[in-house]
């Protein structure tokens, strides 16, 4: 019985008493959920107009990008991001942009989980739909 006490830390039997079962293992605390920054179409346009060094990543299909995109945006289809992640700088602000702003949240989380500083990564709230609503089709360029 002495070996069991050493292995499991139980009190064992003393004077005919019941042994106390070992305490359950302690669970590690849940990690804090990621907080993804969002930037509005107006805030992004102001930063671009100001000449801020921000990388806009358009994650839509190639034909959607060619039809019209935010000036200066880089095209990187969502499925290509894991393979092309090292093309994204860690020393610049990055704004992911999709069609409605949902997938860009996931891409932002992916980048943060892979070592990019959370304060440097954002999702465009409302996505391309929000951009067009705020700035019209004239706020897009084609290539």
Image: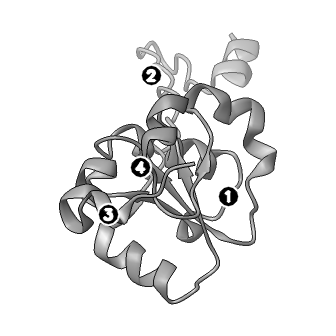
Label 2 – label 4 distance at C-alpha: 37 Å
Tag 1 residue:
116
- Contact (Cβ within 8 Å) of mark 2 with mark 4: no
25 relative to 130, above or below: above
Q: Position of residue 130 (x, y in %)?
A: 24, 56
Q: Is residue 93 rendered to the left or right of residue 126?
A: right
In the rendered structure, the answer to whether residue 4 lies left or right of residue 56 reads right
Left or right for 112, reference 36: right
Q: Report, in whole angstroms, how far the alpha carbon at label 1 lies from the one at label 3.
A: 33 Å
Q: Could you say which is closer to the camera, residue 47 or residue 22? A: 47
Residue ID for mark 3: 138
Give the residue drawn at x 47%, y 26%.
Answer: 24
Whether tag 1 and tag 3 are in contact, CB under 8 A, the answer is no
Query: Residue at the spot x=41%, y=73% of the render?
Result: 44
Residue visible at 71% across and 53% down in the picture = 115
Which secondary structure lies at badge 2?
loop
Q: Earlier in the sequence, mark 4 or mark 3?
A: 4
What residue is pinned by disc 2?
Answer: 20
- Say which mark, if any, is on residue 74: none
Give neighbour class at mark 4: few <14, some 14-19, many 20+ (Cα, 10 Å): few
Q: Nearer the viewer, residue 134 or 109?
A: 134
């Amino acid at each position: 019985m002495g070996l069991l006490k050493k292995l499991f830390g139980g009190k064992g039997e003393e004077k005919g008493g019941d042994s106390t079962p070992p305490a359950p293992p302690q669970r590690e605390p849940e990690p804090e959920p990621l907080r993804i920054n969002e930037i509005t179409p107006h805030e992004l346009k102001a930063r671009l107009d100001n000449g801020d060094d921000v990388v806009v990543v358009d994650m839509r299909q190639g034909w959607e990008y060619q039809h019209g995109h935010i000036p200066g945006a880089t095209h990187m289809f969502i499925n290509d991001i894991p393979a092309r992640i090292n093309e994204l700088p860690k020393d610049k602000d990055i704004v992911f942009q999709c069609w409605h702003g949902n997938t860009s949240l996931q891409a932002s989380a992916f980048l943060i989980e892979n070592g990019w500083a959370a304060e440097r990564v954002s999702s465009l709230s409302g996505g391309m739909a929000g951009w067009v609503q705020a700035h019209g089709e004239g706020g897009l360029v084609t290539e």
